[in-house]
Amino acid sequence: MSASDRLSPCARIGILGGGQLGRMLATAGARLGLDVVIFDPQQACPASRVAAETITAPYEDLDAIARFAQSVDAVTYEFENVPVEAAREAARHAPLRPGVKALDVAQDRITEKTFLNENGAPTVAFRRVRSADDAKVGTEDLGVPALLKTRRFGYDGKGQAVIRDVPAAANAFVTIGEQPAILEAFAPFARELSVIAARGLDGTIEIYPLSENVHADGILRETKAPARSNKALRAEASRIAEAILTALDYVGVLAVELFELEDGTLLVNEIAPRVHNTGHWTEAACRVSQFEQHMRAVAGWPVVDPAPIRKARMINLIGDDVDAWADWLVHPNAVLTLYGKRQTRPGRKMGHVTLLDD
Ligand code: AMP
């Protein structure tokens, strides 16, 4: 990385996607003097109200994507389901960080697991499923319970079915909408962990302490960091994260979701080529948050030791949980973040609170 690769502090960074992640990235960027331009199909998306500028158009509008990318110095994205065509178009006009390959890999569960296994990151055993019969044969092969998931566009536990016996396999295929799918062996995990890692334009890698995560109904509820861990576990998580970042020639922050088995083995559940809900605690408890680290990388600035300074427990405020916001405001250890979403819906992430030294 030479000094000329570094964007100036008044540079304009484009973000594809304007949800809460875009909002927190824009806020972190603004503190460093960067102007953020949001591209999102929805007007008044959470990020638009803190960004320097917003372009409202569908991702399929490649002319709008081109104009957006031409108006900024670098482009990034805040969610992994950005249509690859839109990302490719943006990359024709400005550096796209991270690149298209990370999206390609993360958008398809079979491509993702194949990529992970080829790069020394272990996962559960899996089978490709195109029919009810594939689901049945795969279940006989992998054993029960098994999980059937759509290959694409699954998030927060959507598009998934648990198969508890072989005869249920065909029905599970119907439940997920008879779409191309992946059948996964069930991981008998003791804990769910994640690691947030960053890679700079010069290849420098920095890794945050492991987070321990609790999900319910497929949605993250809580993260504790740093997770209880020994040196071997930390070394293995770092090895996996580094292997993935390097193989993708990645620039920016990436999250690796992990299953820890009883014997300490780590399996990768999935990767997210973006800042991640299990890294929200870094904003309140580290010198450099995942959001700042990502903006640094995208701007070609140094990524650095995040220097965690506090222990943290992050609680997602989902749906009506957000009604307690005024109580959190006066809680002595709480750092409250609200996403500015005007409508509360069940299952919708409305904000989060990080309890320090809890
Ligand atoms: P996903 O959308 O794939 O991240 O899955 C959401 C949640 O379902 C995970 O965080 C786990 O709690 C659970 N899960 C997903 N895949 C598996 C698996 N193969 N074995 C056990 N639990 C799983």
Image (cartoon, helix red, strand yellow):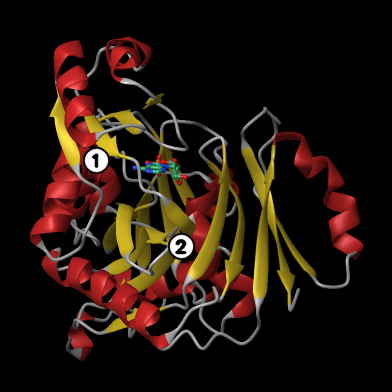
Of residues 169 and 17, the one nearer the viewer is: 169
- Amino acid beneath label 1: Gln
Image quarter in which the C terminus is found = bottom right
Query: Given this view, does label 2 or label 1 mark the residue nearer the observer?
Result: 2
Q: Position of residue 200 (x, y in %)?
A: 26, 78
| Helix, strand or loop for disc 1 | loop
**Category of crowding for the residue at label 1, using alpha-carbon neighbours closer than 10 angstroms: few (below 14), some (14–19), many (at least 20):** many
Residue 222 vs 321, above or below: the answer is below
Mark 2 to mark 1: distance in Å? 21 Å
Residue identifier under label 1: 107
User: What is the tally of numbered marks visible in this picture?
Assistant: 2
Image quarter in which the N terminus is found = bottom left
Q: Position of residue 40 (x, y in %)?
A: 42, 38
Q: Is residue 42 left or right of residue 133?
A: right
Residue at coordinates 51% horizontally, 59% vertically from top-left? 278
Residue 148: name its quadrant: top left
Residue at coordinates 73% horizontally, 75% vertically from top-left? 356
- Amino acid beneath label 2: Leu
Q: Position of residue 134 (x, y in %)?
A: 14, 19
Residue 147: name its quadrant: top left
Residue 148 vs 36, above or below: the answer is above
Residue identifier under label 2: 193
Quadrant for ligand 1 reads: top left
Q: Is residue 289 left or right of residue 151?
A: right
Of residues 290 and 50, the one nearer the viewer is: 290
Residue at coordinates 24% horizontally, 53% vertically from top-left? 123
Q: Is residue 38 left or right of residue 30?
A: left
Residue at coordinates 55% horizontally, 74% vertically from top-left? 31
Mark 2–mark 1 CB contact (< 8 Å): no
